[in-house]
Image (spheres, rainbow, N blue to C red):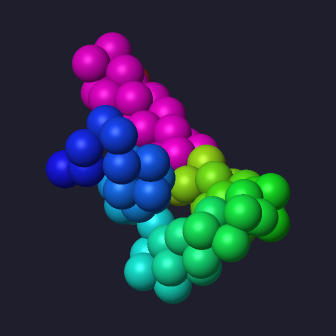
Amino acid sequence: MAEASDTFGIIRQNLEDAGCDEHTTQKCMTLMKAGRPEEALPLLFHYRRELLDHVRSGQKKLDCLDYLIYQIQKKNM
């Protein structure tokens, strides 16, 4: 765990906690240390879209499962 005063350590920990792979983490850290954090935004937005796609896919699966459970409970199957 990074110390509160270790800005780059906190950023790295946040990237790791978010599940970023090593390539993305390294690229973002390089940009942050070079004083160009805005250049990391496209990488972060891309990864965010990937995570959101997984959430949406999981939600669709849950909806299907909930419908099947509902049908079985109502004995419509």
Instruction: Out of 1 and 45, give the one closest to the viewer.
Output: 1
Q: Residue at x 63, y 53 (%)?
A: 48
Q: Residue at x 31, y 29 (%)?
A: 69
Report whether 42 appears left or right of 17.
right
Q: Position of residue 11 (x, y in %)?
A: 46, 53
Q: Is residue 69 magenta?
A: yes
The answer to whether residue 43 is above or below residue 64 is below
Q: Residue at x 50, y 79 (%)?
A: 26
The answer to whether residue 11 is above or below residue 76 is below
How many numbered circles are shown? 0
- In terms of image quadrants, where is residue 24? bottom right
The answer to whether residue 72 is above or below residue 40 is above
* Magenta stretch, residue numbers: 55-74
Q: Residue furthest bottom?
A: 23
Q: Is residue 16 magenta?
A: no
Q: Residue furthest front?
A: 5
Q: Residue furthest top?
A: 74
Where is the C terminus found, in terms of image quarters?
top left
Report whether 46 appears left or right of 10.
right
**Residue 11 showing in the rendered view:** yes
**Residue 17 showing in the rendered view:** no
Instruction: Out of 77 and 22, give the one closest to the viewer.
Output: 22
Q: Main secondary structure of the magenta part?
A: helix
Q: Residue at x 60, y 68 (%)?
A: 33
Q: Position of residue 51 (x, y in %)?
A: 55, 54
Instruction: Out of 3 and 55, give the one closest to the viewer.
Output: 3
